[in-house]
Amino acid sequence: MSMRGRRPARLTPDGRLLVVVIVVSAVLVAVAAVGARRDTVTASFVPPGGLPPSAAPLAPASARPSVSAAPQTLDACAAAAVAKLGLDAQVGQLLMVGTKITSPADLADTVRRYHLGGVFLSGRSTAPAATIRQGVQALQAAATSSGGIPLQVGVDQEGGDVQTLKGVDFPPVPTAVEQGRWDAATLSSRTAAWAGRLLPAGVTIDLAPVADTVPPSFVGSNPPIDGFQRQFGSTPEAVANDVATVVTAIQSTGVLTTVKHFPGLGRVHANTDQSASVTDSLTTVDDPFLAPFAAGIRAGTAAVMVSLARYTRLDPNSIAVYSQPIVTGLLRGKLGFTGLIMSDDLGSADSAGGVPVGDRAVRFVTAGGDMVLTVRSSDAQPMTAALMAQAQASPAFRAQVTAAATRVLRTKFQAGLMTCVR
């Protein structure tokens, strides 16, 4: 994401919503038939080992969440679970809505009312993990009441200024520029160490790493990435190696990753958070600067985030989040990504303006996206209403909603938020 409204006032590039999804123990139970076999789908939270000193276990530590289950198993479990959901619940799973990290429980009613699929913890906090977890648990309780689905809880925890969680349980993480100077073994071990502190706080998905490459000619004139030193390097090859390392290291802790901002914000001269017309006139379908995204996909990232810039050589008519050639043609087709596609902030970012709030969600899903991210809690109602209306009017769009909801739930099985017993 591009930092919109999530960081302190001065952070504008990619400080997205800090959505922390905390999974409460043993909540959702759904039964579905897959083929001739009977699957039991349940929602549960399993904390990882090695909790920070201030964090007491949320539940008995049995099996740690896995992000490497067989794809076929994840697909079958997700399909069985989605088949049990009504249209309103499927639509709700497509939304990740922001809430202040200092008072996450304020979003509880919205979570319950709209069956939200995720929350983004926005802002900055120096509170201990136990305090963050308590707020997330309130949201998880709201999500799973009456047999609901646990939330994906997301944050922007990259490093440098783009670090949502700090304090006693969350030591400072260096900028990506500094991380890019480390050897692979150091980068891997240090990344796993700081990422391992997220799950005990209730965070289930990190909106990181940044796969954007800022070439030397753009250094000093690239606000969203270079302005915050969020790039791992100045060449696609170097960035690709580091992105693959970081994805593997973070997901080894049980937290999912989100490679961003596809197809790249390293060669633009404005920030999509603050400008309505950010344009990249260089990126092509065979561009070497796509290599870091391809590397993240090969490393198994659970999600990819699509940017709000316009790429004239890919689709001159739409910004990336609304572009079928970019989302479906390039990301799904050419790069072969089958995981969760998330939008950058479609709420407060200037590049998302000019389109009615509800239509933003519809356009993203129509382009092939899965999870709509907005930092504004007030967007839940109009986005839900617009998605529902379009799904009821168009069988083709309803099929897209079901497919997107299936991919959202797939990440929840992948993260260990839900359990499928076959």
Image: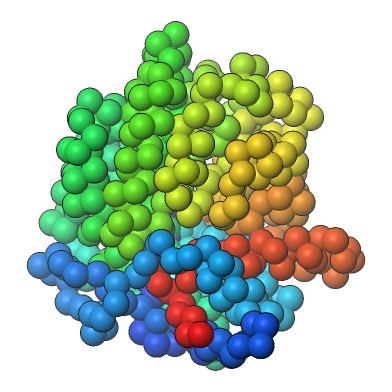
Residue 49 location (% of width, % of height): 19, 70
Q: Quadrant of residue 229?
A: top left
Residue 248 location (% of width, % of height): 34, 48
Q: Residue at x 51, y 85 (%)?
A: 422
269 lies above or below 405 = above
Residue 193 location (% of width, % of height): 19, 52
Q: Quadrant of residue 328?
A: top right
Residue 311 location (% of width, % of height): 67, 26
Q: Residue at x 32, y 40 (%)?
A: 245
Q: Nearer the viewer, residue 422 or 192?
A: 422
Q: How is the image coloured?
A: rainbow
Q: Quadrant of residue 115?
A: bottom right
221 lies above or below 241 = above
Residue furthest toward the top?
217
Q: Is residue 308 left or right of residue 188?
A: right
17 lies above or below 132 = above
Q: Is residue 142 left or right of residue 336?
A: left
Q: Nearer the viewer, residue 265 or 10?
A: 265
Residue furthest toward the left?
53
Q: Residue at x 20, y 30 (%)?
A: 182
Q: Residue at x 49, y 44 (%)?
A: 297
Q: Nearer the viewer, residue 268 or 379?
A: 268
Residue 180 visible: yes
